[in-house]
Image: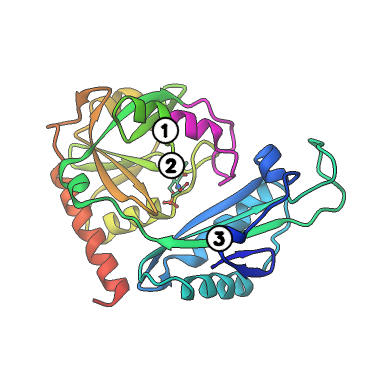
Amino acid sequence: MIYLNGEFIPLAEARVPVMDRGFLFGDGVYEVIPVYARRPFRLAEHLQRLERSLAGIRLANPHSVAEWTALIGKIIDSETSEDQQVYLQISRGADSKRNHAFPKTVVPTVFVMSEPLVTPPAEQSKLGIGAVSSADNRWHRCDLKTTSLLANCLLRQLAVEAGCAEPLLFRDGFLTEGAASNIFVVKDGVLLAPPKNHLMLPGVTYDVILELAAAHGLAYQVRDILEEEVRRADELWMTSSTKEVLPIVSLDGRPVGSGKPGPVFADMHGWYQQFKRAIKGN
Ligand code: PDD
């Protein structure tokens, strides 16, 4: 079962008009929310980011927090898996003509679905993943989680064609993030994170990582990170709601640090799993 514009229907029956601005212009926003033991993780934070993204594209939020919570709860109940990933999307809706400017009256298209949560296979955390560097050629509002993801898709595809999992993006000589993840650097035992600004998505997992670092006494700095610092890193990690935290062991075919997942990653991965077990109550 999925939710589309007020109805709970099977996915195969869901239809959106071709004049939907989400289809024509990528004019919409979205969220991906992990669900552990049937409970949405950091729902308040995801809904706050959704509110910010909607405000950023000048679209009124079609639902209150209570309505979103009920709606997402119903979709979770209709799935059999204990751990899930909820995807929700709001586009500006369907107009009668194609016109870049917003229509005067239009009803947004609201779509919510949930799937079993697919976290990375254990061997990826054990062996690590490869990354390639790319110029960050996206727009200047990467802090908004919009469905206009063509640049992200092209950048991810470049990485995949190089046999890697994620591109590391650099703008004006500084690290921004990955195609669908935030990036962390470890140097001399200190965790470095790029500051939240208009050039990267403020990740919910990013916050979890910094909270876990603080809770366990791992020194960290939030500051601009030069491309050279990334290339000389002892460890690199990528984080997202679905990937959690993964070690990057090669960049552009060269080893990162020892070329194996590092000791600071091992600590953080352990803390993350412990944290998840506490949430799940086991
Ligand atoms: N992507 N940066 C970008 C560009 C992202 O698309 C994502 C998440 C993140 C990490 O954010 P969070 O920790 O809140 O998931 C950073 C989701 C998972 C996606 O597009 O599927």
Furthest toward the front, the residue is: 12
Residue 269, compared with residue 154, is above or below; it is below
On residue 156, the disc is 1
| Residue type of the residue flagged with mark 1 | Arg
Q: Which residue is rendered at x = 81% and y = 37% of the image?
A: 98
The quarter of the rendered structure image containing the N terminus is bottom right
Asked if the residue under mark 2 is in contact with the one under mark 3, i.e. CB atoms within 8 Å, the reply is: no
Q: Does the magenta segment cover residue 142?
A: yes
Q: Separation of disc 1 and disc 2 at Cα?
A: 8 Å
Circle 2 is placed at which residue position? 180
One can see residue 4 in this view: yes
Looking at the picture, which amino acid does disc 3 mark? Answer: Leu
Pointer 3: residues within 10 angstroms few (<14), some, or many (20+)? few
* Circle on res. 63: none
Depicted 195 relative to depicted 70: above or below: above
Q: Which residues are the magenta region?
A: 136-156
Badge 2 marks a residue whose secondary structure is loop
Distance from the alpha carbon under mark 1 to that under mark 3: 26 Å
What SS does tag 1 mark?
helix
Which SS class for mark 3?
Answer: helix
Please report the residue visible at 34 percent of the width from the left and 56 percent of the height from the top.
Answer: 118
Ligand 1 closer than 8 Å to label 3 CB:
no
